[in-house]
Amino acid sequence: MTRNLAELSGPAAASMLAPSSVVVVPTGAVEHHGPHLPLITDYLLADSVGSSAVERAAAAGIDVWMLPTLAYTKSDEHAWAPGTVWLSWDAMMKTVIDIGRSVATTPARTLVFLNGHGGNVALLQVALREIRRRFGLNTFLIGVQVSADGVEPPEEECDLGIHGGHGETSLIMHIRPDLVDMSLAERNVPSHIADAEYIGFHSKPVSFGWLSDDFGPSGVIGDPTRANTADGAAIFEAAVSQATAALVEISRFRPAREGL
């Protein structure tokens, strides 16, 4: 049986969804990823990991469904690069809130965004509460994992491989190798900021506003030169396993103690 909600008829969706149903919306992007990766890199990550995780969670007995992946999202950090197609923050916010409003017209009470693009994270976190407050849905955000135990990025990446680097490139080599041109892969790591104690991207306590061409004209932030299919397969499996386990936990999660 399909787990793609949009493949059902309207009456079938209304009859098959229940308050326990979990609806997953993958969010990707169409944006510049350097010369070696396709514009749909983040879309492919969200869509492929989302599809596999939904199938596995359903096989484990979870009543989970997937809506079509959002392609156009908040990618203005790459607006300088031809081919990037992005929504303004307010258009994106209105879009995901309207999705929440639409899901709320069904019997389903849980909405999950499974995100493959870092530029969406802050906005989606705000949207979770907005949708919760307006429509009463239980709302969650799962990030697509781009690392795995046993897979070590190049030391030269300096833990700064956040865009078009080893992890993402390896994943796309696994998912769609026909779209990767490794002859054009080049290292571009802003190593001058690696020693900053507080300021950084994900693991540091101080974030900062940036555009991808702040770090050079390639748009890459990382070192894709040693990316490979084996690492991509391992990272993909880790990402799907994590997302599946998260969906199982989400299906059982209740924020308040019963009886309160």
Image (cartoon, rainbow, N blue to C red):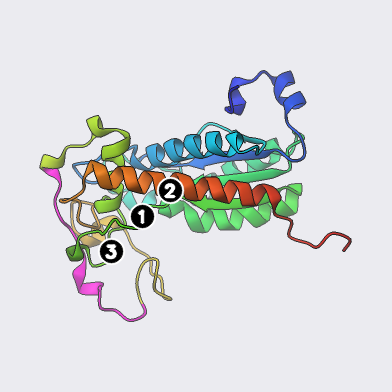
Q: Earlier in the sequence, mark 1 or mark 3?
A: 1
| Residue 28 location (% of width, % of height) | 43, 42
| Residue 56 location (% of width, % of height) | 54, 37
| Residue 226 location (% of width, % of height) | 16, 51
The span from disc 1 to disc 3 (Cα, nearest Å) is 16 Å
Would you say residue 85 is visible in this rendering? no
Marks 1 & 2, CB-CB < 8 Å contact: yes
Residue lying farthest to the left in this orientation = 183
Q: What residue type is labelled 1?
A: Ala
Q: Earlier in the sequence, mark 2 or mark 3?
A: 3
| Position of 191 relative to 58 (above/below) | below
Instruction: Depth check: give the residue in front, 251 or 188.
Output: 251
Marks 2 & 3, CB-CB < 8 Å contact: no
* Residue at the disc numbered 1: 148
* Residue density around tag 2, few if under 14, some if 14–19, many if 20 or more, within 10 Å: many
Q: Which residue is drawn at 56% across and 52% down?
A: 141
Q: Earlier in the sequence, mark 1 or mark 2?
A: 1
Q: Residue at x 40, y 38 (%)?
A: 43
Res. 239 mark: 2
Magenta extent: 184-198
| Residue 170 location (% of width, % of height) | 26, 45
Residue 114 in the magenta stretch? The answer is no
* Residue at the disc numbered 3: 160
* Residue density around tag 1, few if under 14, some if 14–19, many if 20 or more, within 10 Å: some
| Position of 78 relative to 57 (above/below) | below
Callout 2: SS: helix
Q: Which of marks 1 and 3 is in front?
A: 1
Q: What residue type is labelled 3?
A: Leu
